[in-house]
Image: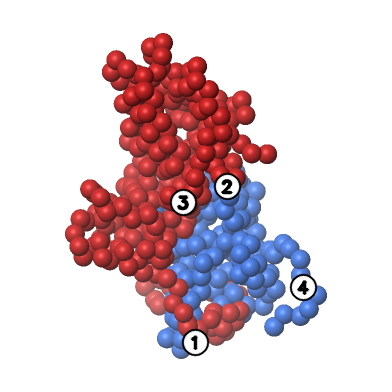
Chain colours: A blue, B red
Amino acid sequence: MGLPRRVWDSNVVIGFLCGSPQTKPDCELIIAQAERGELEIVVSAIVEAEVAYLKGVEEDDAELKIREFFSRDYIIVAAVDRPVTRLARKLIRQYHLTESPDAVIMATTVHLQVPILETYEKGLLGLDGSKCDPPIVIRQPQYSGTISMFSQK
Amino acid sequence: MSYELTFIIHPEAESVSLNLFEKSLHDIHRLVKDVDYSVTKESGARRWIISHLHSSSPTISLRPVLDNDETISALVDGLDTIKIGGIEPPPHFSEDVLDDLLQMRRLFKGKDKVRLLEFSLNGHKAIIQPDTAGKVDRILRSGYTNIGSLEGSLDAVNLHNNPTFTIWDRVTRAPVRCHFPKNDIWKRKIKTLLEKRVSVSGEINYFGNGMPRSVTNIMQIEDVTPEPGLKRATFGSITCDEASVDPAAFVRKIRREIGNGIT
């Protein structure tokens, strides 16, 4: 059996990389858990493209950091291929999703049978509990595990 | 508890000839080896030993030297799934494993043939019989092809006849056979990439359930081993005030801007 997986939406990755207070402390703790080899984070290839729109930074520096992040062993980049787009089309019609990237990210989760999709997008959070096959949990990033008594840097 | 895989060769005739016995053993060994590789990622090194041997209807029990019950369950459960029919391959039944089953058709042909091969694990039985190959063929014919790429570690290079290597796809964790051109440039290239993380672009052939099964017409292979010395992306290591205030609103905004051609 492989490691447990969860899918991260673009806004979670961007929130983490930009230090959004919203992502603290869960995302840091989830990353630390992944560093310990306890889980894997799946991201759609769309996410890898969308982080390029981060502004107000030195581009070369940001690009190197982004490359480093997506090359980590526990970051699994999933392709947007035909079964995903077919499923995304179905989800757009079924749930009247207005953003096609949201549908692609949700479809990636369902297609790869990853049980959890973590996002800050209200449109997607509202679909938690909707009937997908297999069913998925859609929630904000949530760390589950123990927290060290010693402060982390 | 140590699990055993037991198989019985049921011949069409009253007894099993030495030739049929040898052919059956050869095919079963190949099948076990390929399922084992698919489950454990260990090629060649693992040894299986005979734990029991009965002679009436040749009945042989096997177990791996190193405990790994998953291979045996994968094999017996997988054969059971194939018996039901359908177009999806059972877990760990890679293209290599399905090819092994297809090749076992030869055991059911000619005067000296097998009636059925029975496999069991703790009383759970599964069989390979003459119609198994047809069901496997259906699985192999189903599916679709995309032009795209797969990423994974490069393993098990075979330079004979039509050269292939295997990559362990990072997304599905499945072994995928990749066919590459038969020339020295490619051979050298593939050898240097052994055990590295690579990205392979070409025609990706998938089973009906979306599991990749092989890559043909490879256009490019690239070493994507993480680069040492890259600056680490930690929490807040990229400064973008707008994105840090409300990442969801930021993403919505950039998508709208892309849609309107403003970036």
What is the CA distance from the residue labelled 3 to the residue labelled 2? Answer: 11 Å
Q: Nearer the viewer, residue B108 or A101?
A: B108
Tags 2 and 1 on a common chain:
no
Number of the front mark, 4 or 2: 2
Q: What whole-number distance in Å separates the C-alpha atoms at marks 4 and 1?
A: 34 Å
Q: Nearer the viewer, mark 1 or mark 3?
A: 3
Q: Residue furthest bottom?
A: A58
Which residue, given by chain and number where applicable, does mark 1 sit on?
A56
What is the number of the mark on residue B45?
Answer: 3
SS category of the residue bearing label 1:
loop
Query: Do the residues at pointers 4 and 1 share their chain?
Result: yes
Residue designated by label 4: A148
Look at label 4 and name its amino acid.
Ser
**Mark 2: few, some, or many residues within 10 Å (few <14, many ≥20)?**
few
Which quarter shows the N terminus of chain B?
Answer: top right
Residue A64 x %, y %: 45, 81
Q: Which residue is mark 2?
A: B66
